[in-house]
Image (cartoon, rainbow, N blue to C red):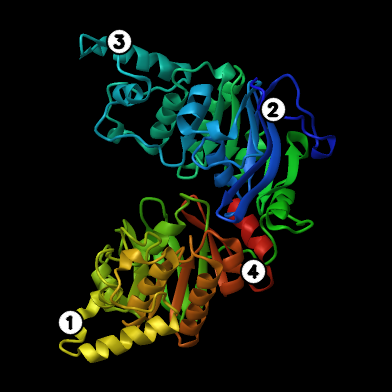
Amino acid sequence: MGGGERLCRPLHEDLGRVMVAGTRLAVRDLTVSYGAHQVVRQISFDVAAGSTSALLGANGSGKSTTVKALTGINRAGEGSCVSLNGDTIKARDLAPRETRRRGIRVVHQEAPLIANLTVAEMMAHHTGFPVTAGIVKRRELIRDAAETLGEFDVHVDPNRLCGELDAGDRALVSLAISMAGIPVDSALLILDEATASLSSADADRLLRRVHDATQRGLSVLMVTHRLSEVSSYADETLVLRDGHIARTFVREDFSEDEAIAAMVGVKHIEGEVDRRGAHEATSMPADADLRVEGLSGRQVCGATFGCAAGEILGVTGRNGAGASELLRLVGGVARATAGRVTIGGADLEPGSPRSAILEGVYFLSSDRINEGGVPLMTVGENMLLPRVERYGLGRRQARADVDRLMDELAVSPGDPTVPFGSLSGGNQQKVLLSRWLLMSPRVMLLDDPTAGVDPKTREVIFGQLRALADQGICIVIRSSEPEHLARLCDRVLVIRDGHIAMQLDGDDLTLEEVTHATFA
């Protein structure tokens, strides 16, 4: 070691274990800051050789930030210490190329495969093409790819185009690509929500392949929201909350209830998933204005529910379970394969946003740029875009309406002539919400509207939604934050594997219950 480089110290006994000779990854005093705000606060943990450690935590707890620091995407604080296979990596050397070279590999939630490349070409894109005199040796290319796929028992033709693979095969190919060129017994594999968009069957296929590799010495750090995966595969579980390790479990002591309690910061949660008041959500309010019956799409299967005028209905579920698609189907943004949606008795045309808009049903996407505003148009133009003809030559009235809503939602800067793309994410979301408020909505469908916005902006948006409900408008909101649903909603529907699994309301609509129902 160089004179200025220090070895990672062993974990103290009060953290539950000491560093042993079989440690693959040792992390000590890891900190990550965004400006003056410290997001990860001196966390320390080990991942043993040939073992799987799970990293749990609610959104904003520091999971993704930790993973990005370990892979060099985020800069770790100078006091941080990371050691891989006994070799210490200086904080300044935690860069993507260097961490990959040393043996830290990642499989992400969305497998980053290029659709028009074959599986073999995609692998070579990462490991290098075998060439002679500038000509690719195709036989060797295919042979190398087949060997790498075979190492993880992945039965995919190397000549297939990546764009032809289903979600399960894409994940398996991504696993093989990430591990190409390194022995499993010296590598750390990070599964960064790798199963989030997979069905339970495909997720299990992937995790069984990974588990088989741990028997050959692979070490795994698994970031997931699926507690059943933690129960089945994790040897140790770390629960992050507010940038700290709130609790550590070994396999024998892991409890889903206790893990959720640690995630949300309560002492204990009693009982199983099906609690009093958590019931099948197949009935709908007798006075439902919005009625959804047997609605199906790519993920959603046979959803039936209703929302009454003046009600705020929450929808939640793990990534890929179908909660987001449900709102898109109701709003006509995605085409349904079966089912019926009515508002006040009027049928909406399947897969037709125009039909929904004409009936006063408006969808607000979580993707503010690609499915929301036009960056180069002004704030005012974005707000008026859906019904610009409504104002005709009445520019004075248009400006008055824009100014009024910008003031109500505290859009900053308060100048409607600035480009939409120059606004912060939270102010962009306020503008997009204002757009639909100008249309006199009957139903608002909001897909994670406060994702990535600051707390002050979130409260402004929540206040506006409560005011809309008080005016008799139906509000259906999906959120990735159980706390927000518990605070805001009258009822919450929980989606699992495309089905509405349960409904939470009354005394059971609490942070703990929503968290448990979502992640268990």
Tell me the amino acid under the disc marked 3: Glu
Inter-mark Cα distance, 4 to 3: 59 Å
Query: What element does badge 4 sit on?
Result: loop
Looking at the picture, does residue 370 appear above or below residue 132? below
Q: Nearer the viewer, residue 168 or 57?
A: 57
- Residue at the far left: name it: 393
Q: Position of residue 33 (x, y in %)?
A: 58, 50
* Residue found at x 31% / y 58%: 370
Name the residue rendered at 37%, 37% in the picture.
Answer: 112
Cα distance in 3D space between marks 2 and 3: 43 Å
Q: Report the disc number at residue 509.
A: 4
Q: Nearer the viewer, mark 4 or mark 3?
A: 3
- Say few, some or many: other residues with alpha carbon within 10 Å of mark 2 (under 14 / 14 to 19 / 20 or more): few
Work out which residue is located at the far top of the displayed protein and give it. Answer: 132
Amino acid under disc 4: Leu
Provide the residue designation for mark 2.
6
List the residue tagged with mark 1: 389
x then y, percent, for residue 468:
46, 83
